[in-house]
Amino acid sequence: MGGGWKRPDLPEGALKNLNDELHELHGLSGHRTTREIERWLKREYGDEAPSHTKVHQVFTRPRLSNPELLLRIVRQLALRIRSVNEEDECDRFDALWLAAREEELNQQRRRREQPGSSCPASDDLSAITPPQLQVERLSTPSQILNRGELVDQIEARDPTLPDPQASRAVFAGNDPRGLGPGPACVVAEQLCGLLRHPSGTFLNQNTVASIEPTKDQLLMQLQEAADHAEDTLLFYYAGRSRVSRNGLLLRVSEIKQQGGLFVNYEAIRGIVSGSRARRKVVILECSSHAGQVLEAVGPVQREDGHTVAANPSTYVIVARRPLAEAADDSPSLPFTETLMEILRDGIRGAPELLTVDTIVREIRRKARELEFPEPKFLIRNDRRLALARNPEYPQVTTISAR
C-alpha cells in the first residue's frame, strides 16, 4: 500500500482540511506503507497497536477517525521527518481534529432541528458520537461545552463546593535534574495556598504541598488523603513526564534508593479510583503532549474490565508546558499560572461559584489568546463541582491589598 493513497471525496470544510494535511504529512515522510506504520506502532504500543488495514482506513475513509489512533500515526510519521517536531504536529492535528469534530456536531444538530428529522433528539453525546469514541470519550470543552443547549442544562444545576471537612488535596511539584525546588515546586505550593482556608476551599490540615517528593513519599501522601476523603479528592502534579509503553510516568525525586526516578500514573490512578470520595479531580501540568497523556491516563477500569461510569464523578485536566519551557527549568507553567490568576481575580460575568467547567473554558480562551497549549479535559458524570468562589461576582466582596 505504498505511495500516495487515494483521498476520500469530501466537501470543503474542517474534515477535508484534516484529511488533506494528513496526506501531506504522509507524503513528507516518504509515502511510508501501512505495514511500516503498523510495525512502528507495534514497537511502541505492543498488542494495542492497530492493524495495517485500520491504519489505511484513517487515510482513506470519508469520516472522522478515532483521535488517539490519528495522533499515534501522526507522531510516528513526524518522527521520520527531520524538519518536523512531533509534539508540534500532534498539537496541530489535535486542533484540526477538534475543528472537524465540532463541524460534525454542528451538522448533526442542524439535522435534528429540521422538521421530521429522525436524528436523536437527546443531548446525550453517546447518541451522536461514533462507536469508537463512546467509551469514556476524552472530551474537551470545544467539543461539548460550546453546544449551547447542553451548556444551559449543565449550568442550570446548582454547583457545589467541596465539603471542607470531608475533602482532601495533594499538590505535588518536581523540577528536573535535581536542582532543588524550582518553578514547578513554586507553583504547586502557591496553588495549594490559594485553595486553602481561609480564602480557599480546603482546610489547611486537609491539604499537603508535596515538594520534590520521592516516589514512596508521594504515594504515601496521596494514599493517606484518599483514605480520608469522602466528598472531594484533588491531586495536582507539576513537573516532568514521559509516555512509554508502560503508560504515563511522572518524575519524582532523584533519591534512587527510595523508589526510582519516576512513578507510573497507574499507581496514582489506583489510589484515586480506590478512594471513597464521591468526586475526584486530577490536574497534571507536565512535559508530555497532553493528548498522549490523556490517552495514557484513560478511563478508570474495574477488575472485570468494565469502565466505571456511574459513580464517583471524575475530572481529569491535562496541560502541557510549551516545548521550550518543558525542556529546562524555565519559570513558565502557563496553565497553572492562569488557573491561579482566575482563583485570585475571578471571571467577570461568571456565576458566584466557579465550576471546573467554567474554569477550564476560561483557561482555554486565554490559551488561544496568549498562545500556549490548550488543556485537555475529561469529565465523567457530574459537572457541578466548583473549586472556588468568584471574586468578580457582584455579591462577593474582597479586600484588595494596596
Image (cartoon, rainbow, N blue to C red):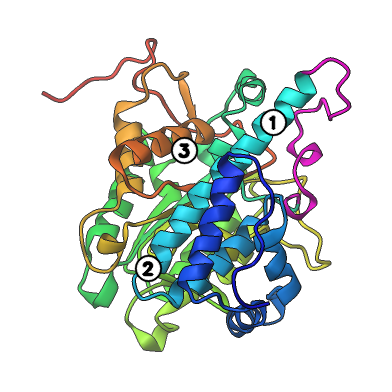
- Of the pair 12 and 56, the residue shown nearer to us: 12
- Of the pair 279 and 197, the residue shown nearer to us: 279
Quadrant in which the N terminus appears: bottom right
**Identity of the amino acid at label 3?**
Val
Label 2 belongs to which residue? 84
- Residue drawn at x 66%, y 26% as measured from the top left: 150
The mark lying in front, picked from 3 and 2, is 2
**Mark 2 to mark 1 CA distance (whole Å):** 33 Å
**Mark 3 to mark 1 CA distance (whole Å):** 25 Å
Task: Answer left or right for 201 relative to 391.
Answer: right
Task: Answer left or right for 215 relative to 32.
Answer: left
Disc on the earlier residue, 3 or 1: 1
Vertical relation: 87 (above or below) 371: below
- Of the pair 182 and 401, the residue shown nearer to us: 182
Q: Which residues are magenta?
A: 114-134
Label 3 belongs to which residue? 360
Disc on the earlier residue, 2 or 1: 2
* Label 1 neighbour load within 10 Å: few <14, some 14-19, many 20+: few
**Identity of the amino acid at label 2?**
Val
Q: Do the residues under discs 2 and 1 have CB atoms within 8 angstroms?
A: no
Quadrant in which the C terminus appears: top left
What x and y, as percent, mark residue 192?
35, 47
The mark lying in front, picked from 3 and 1, is 1
- Residue drawn at x 64%, y 64% as measured from the top left: 69
Label 1 belongs to which residue? 107
Q: Do the residues under discs 3 and 1 have CB atoms within 8 angstroms?
A: no
